[in-house]
Amino acid sequence: MKSLLFLVLFVSFNFCYGQNDSIFIRKNIEPFSDKPVYKTDTIVFDTPNARNILIGNVILPQTSNQQLTKSYGLFFEEFGVKDCSESQDEPKPNKIVEIDRSKEEWGIKAIVYTNCCQDFLADVEVKNDNTLNLIFINYGMYCFCSCPFEITYKFRVMEFDDLKKIKFVSINDEAKTNLE
């Protein structure tokens, strides 16, 4: 009986311990060559919950800011970036250019000026109980140019009482715009 119990415990332990997760990454290691030169790498995680790899333009997953924003009825679901179309010598101030609000969805477009070779991480927060602050963090390779990028934040909306408190939208605590 003891050996049967030991065998069952041993098999179940090995089954649970063997639950690894892996990600394959393919990266161009020669960004300025005419033909891409790729390097492939593998990352193995002990548990599926430990993998937090952010590549390109992405929403920072499940931040405390986003969880608090949900209490206002705004669920951050999509983030988009249009590639730079024209390089500029000097960056201009960031600005919100369009706010589309419906009962089910909000879409907010902004023009942000930053280094032309960088990607974006996105987050949102509610400030002062009345301002939806769109947050972006630019990161990546540095080039000697500046570009206007059109970034879009999309939210699924649920009619919570606190949603009526949101009167303004800002981007990185600047370019505050009235919702009305």
Image (tube, helix red, strand yellow):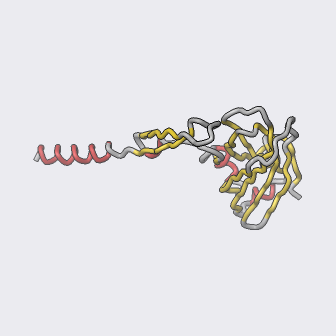
Which quadrant holds residue 137? Answer: top right
Q: Is residue 78 above or below residue 52?
A: below
At a point 35% along the width and 46% down the height, the residue shown is: 19
- Residue ranking furthest to the front: 34
- Residue ranking furthest to the bottom: 103
12 vs 32, nearest the viewer: 32
Which quadrant holds residue 22? Answer: top left
At a point 67% along the width and 55% down the height, the residue shown is: 78
**Number of numbered discs:** 0
Residue 63 horizontal/vertical position (percent): 62, 44
Residue 176 horizontal/vertical position (percent): 87, 46
124 vs 148, nearest the viewer: 148
The answer to whether 98 appears left or right of 67 in the picture is: right
Q: Quadrant of the C terminus?
A: bottom right
The answer to whether 16 appears left or right of 2 in the picture is: right
Residue 168 horizontal/vertical position (percent): 84, 51
